[in-house]
Image (cartoon, helix red, strand yellow):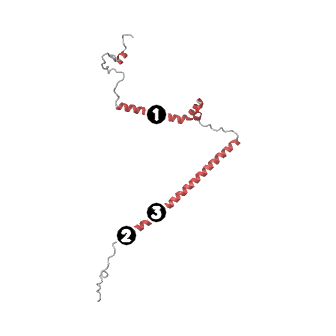
Amino acid sequence: MSSTRSEFSASRRPTKPSVSPTLQPADFKDDWFPSERPSLANRASRALARFLITLCIGVAGTLAWQSYGDAARERLASAFPQLGWLAPPAAPVARTAPDVIAPTATAASSADQQQLNTMSLGLAAVRQSVDQLAAGQEQMTRDITKLQTTAQGILDNIAAPPPRPSGAAARKPAPLTPAH
């Protein structure tokens, strides 16, 4: 090596050798790994930036998968045969003959009709239970009104003071003396 040093090497390397024969501590002002930690604000801003970048990558990946998911699965399945289960299910090929298309249409309409019948039965059951709930609520309203009327009558009887005996009826009979 030449005796002249570049400006970069002079500023980044320690001027003293790190191992000295007298075992004196090394000069840490030109250390390669500074021991000072960044401030809490710097660490928090870096963490927030990492979080936002990760979030944006996730959102972009989700949008891309929704847009190109089937095409991507098809390419992966064709490139790697062991990932064939990723391929989207193949759409049935429609034949041009009308006699082949007609049974498919009737099968689809019968499945739709069956589903419609199932839904109408479910709606009828829901309607019946709603009617039962309404009838129960009406009965409960009548019972509550009847109880309130009864309770009001009881409270009126308790609140009224008992009748006082009249003056003639309040007289005590004279004690009877025994006859000898």
Near-viewer residue (73 or 30): 30
Circle 3 SS class: helix
- Name the residue located 48 percent from the left edge and 63 percent from the top edge: 139
Kindly indicate whether the residue at mark 2 contacts the one at mark 1 (C-beta within 8 angstroms): no
- Quadrant of residue 51 in the image? top left
Q: Residue furthest bottom?
A: 180
Disc 3 crowd, CA 10 A, few/some/many (<14, 14-19, 20+): few
User: Distance between the Cα atoms at labels 2 and 3?
Assistant: 23 Å
Q: Amino acid at mark 1?
A: Cys
Q: Amino acid at mark 3?
A: Thr
- Name the residue located 46 percent from the left edge and 64 percent from the top edge: 143
Can you tell which mark lies on residue 156? 2
Q: Position of residue 28 (x, y in %)?
A: 32, 21
Name the quadrant of the N terminus.
top left
Near-viewer residue (139 or 27): 27
- Quadrant of residue 44 in the image? top left
Pointer 1 or 2: first along the chain:
1
Q: Is residue 15 above or below residue 71?
A: above
User: Distance between the Cα atoms at labels 1 and 3?
Assistant: 57 Å
Disc 2 crowd, CA 10 A, few/some/many (<14, 14-19, 20+): few
Can you tell which mark lies on residue 56? 1
For discs 1 and 2, the disc positioned in front in the rendered view: 2
Circle 3 residue: 141
User: Distance between the Cα atoms at labels 1 and 2?
Assistant: 73 Å
Position of residue 7 in the picture relative to residue 130 (left or right): left
Q: Position of residue 125 (x, y in %)?
A: 56, 55
Circle 1 SS class: helix
